[in-house]
Image (cartoon, rainbow, N blue to C red):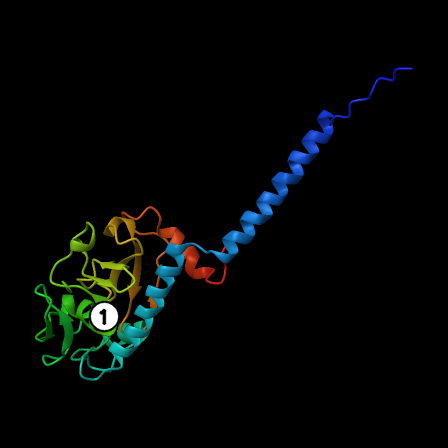
Amino acid sequence: MDMKKEKNAFTLAETLLTIMIIGILVALMLRAINRVNPDKDKVLFLKAYHATEAAIGNIINDTTKYDPTYLTEAERDAAEQQEGTTLNLDFRDDPYPDATAYITDESGNQVEKKNIKRSEAVCYFLADQLNTIGAVKCDSNGSEGIDGANFRLSNNVCFYNWSGVKENGSVDGVIDPTCTSAAEGYVIRVFKDGKVTVPKTASGHDNQSKAYEWLQNQTDVK
């Protein structure tokens, strides 16, 4: 007697359930991978940011570079009401004439940079403190690629637009983890009291909020 063999097959519901389970597993795996491999730009930016923080601390505490006395904003406001008051608050004050930065010039030679202009001082002093490669160019601000940078770190992060002092005495500069251009980087702001911040928005930097969030969530690697 012949008996027909029954053919077993997945139903549509079973197939969809299987696909859904696979999707969930893939999503969990990707999340785990992202935790192991955080955003490279975030890691490089935060390293450069904290290196800058430490360097600024060294610069403002080096009595051969700047007058170590300064006032808080409240103290400055009060002092400005008094005639004849000498204010030493911020980077609007000139560095000492003999202040020296040791940098690499365009010819690849290690040189002593003296008689540093106020607008270029933070840039040269930072380059002196940080681990740079290649020439340091703080006398101009370019925009494109490595050649337009003020200087480049050994991990290929570029610093742009560090020449200049704002009206409130702070200095704004750009850190670009990709070393592509100033526009691709993120603005950070430094003050002579050692405070370093990341503005939430910056003109010409559409992704500035990303760096702001990175700083707020430094342990978050998702």
Q: Which amino acid, by three-letter code, is at mark 1?
A: Leu
Q: Foreground residue, 127 or 15?
A: 15
Number of labels in the image equals 1
Q: Going by the picture, which residue comes out furthest to the front?
A: 1
Residue 195 visible somewhere in the drawing: no
Q: Looking at the figure, which quarter contains the N terminus? A: top right
Q: Foreground residue, 137 or 81?
A: 137
Residue 211 x %, y %: 38, 55
Residue 148 x %, y %: 17, 54
Residue 207 x %, y %: 35, 48
Residue 172 visible somewhere in the drawing: yes
Q: Foreground residue, 29 or 149?
A: 29
Instruction: Please identify the quarter of the rendering in which residue 212 is found.
Output: bottom left
Which residue in the structure is indicated by mark 1? 126
Q: 212 above or below 196?
A: above
Callout 1 crowding tier (Cα within 10 Å): few <14, some 14–19, many ≥20: many
Q: Is residue 172 left or right of residue 7?
A: left
Q: Going by the picture, which residue comes out furthest to the top?
A: 1
The residue depicted at 25 percent of the width and 66 percent of the height is 170
Q: Is residue 114 left or right of residue 77?
A: left
The residue depicted at 36 percent of the width and 65 percent of the height is 47
Q: Is residue 46 left or right of residue 98?
A: right
Residue 106 x %, y %: 9, 63
Q: Secondary structure at mark 1?
A: helix
The residue depicted at 32 percent of the width and 74 percent of the height is 54
Q: Going by the picture, which residue comes out furthest to the right?
A: 1
Instruction: Please identify the quarter of the rendering in which residue 167 is found.
Output: bottom left
The residue depicted at 40 percent of the width and 57 percent of the height is 42
